[in-house]
Structure formats: structure tokens, C-alpha cells
Image (tube, rainbow, N blue to C red):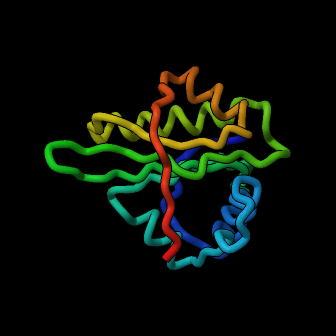
Amino acid sequence: MIRITQLKKGSKSAVKELIQLVTELRRDTSEHKGSVSDLKNIVTNKNAALIVAKDNAHIVGMGTLYIVGKIGKRVGYIEDVVVSSNYRGQGLGEKIMRALIAAARKNKLGTLFLTSHTNRPAANNLYMKLGFELVETNPYKLKL
């Protein structure tokens, strides 16, 4: 049975499984790094929620909510929503997203933001189904 839950502890096996998932999401191999320390920083951060889909003890899907305080408001950013290719088509992405949205509501956030590449039509359709609206913006990136 697959469970959707917030990850509360970091471990080597969790890092390995999360990195494996991220490889299905990102092409840039320099972004496929991580440590137990990195994971512990996320799961113990009161301004983050790492939601995972677990098949027994194995992580097969994930999504992260990051809460950012701004002048006069708090907003959320959803990052790295991905389900293992072996588990797609079971509604796990939607369940992860609904758990992230619930966490955002629990934290009384005013707005949620996310980005998704155009080559992910199933993900983009899911986000629109859940009420996200496509906004016009220019994404920029500066590698440091």
C-alpha cells in the first residue's frame, strides 16, 4: 500500500531514493547531489514540508513546499514534484500536490507558486486541474 506522508527524518537511503527521483525530473547532472545533512536541514525546517509517496519503506514520489516570508505576506513555492516512472498513472502526483496544498493552507499562506517545464504535459494538466493558473513571467537563472 502506498502512503502519502511528510518526511520527518533524513537518512542515507532516503537521500539515495530522492536523488533517484530527481534524476527523472532534471537533466542537469550537476543538480543530482545531496547529503543526509541537506535532507535533515529540509525536514527539520519549519518553513519547509517534504511530502513523499512511500511504497512500504521506499520513496517513490516527492514534492516540497518552501514557505517564504515577505513584507506583509507569506507565500509558498512548490518544488521538485515527481513520481517514479514505475508508479505513474496511479494518481500519486495529485495526492502529493493535495498534501502540499493542505500544508500551505495549514500555514495560512496567501499564494502558492510553482514552475513546470512545457515538456511535462501531464504535470501541467494536473496543476491546472488543481486550480493553478498560468502566469506570464520571464524566468531567469544565475549560476553562482
Outermost residue on the right side: it is 86
Specify whether 100 is left or right of 23. left
Residue at 49% x, 67% y is: 142
x then y, percent, for residue 67: 34, 51
The answer to whether residue 14 is left or right of residue 46 is right
Residue at the limit of the structure toward the left, as seen here: 72
Say how many tags the image has.
Answer: 0
Of residue 66 and residue 16, the one placed in the foreground of this image is 66
In the figure, residue 125 lies in which quadrant? top right
Task: Please state which of residues 84 and 132 is positioned toward the viewer in this rendering.
Answer: 132
Viewer-proximal residue among 126 and 38: 126
Q: Image point 79% across, 31% down: which residue?
A: 89
Does residue 68 sit above or below 106 in this rendering?
below
Q: Looking at the rendering, which quadrant does residue 105 occupy? A: top left
Q: Which of the pair 45/111 is nearer the observer? A: 111
Quadrant of the image for the N terminus? top right
* Residue found 16% across the figure and 49% down from its top: 71
- Residue at horizontal 54 percent and vertical 43 percent from the top: 115
| Residue 65, position as x, y percentages in the image | 45, 49
Q: Position of residue 31 (x, y in %)?
A: 64, 69
Q: Is residue 42 left or right of residue 28?
A: left
Q: Position of residue 20 (x, y in %)?
A: 75, 63
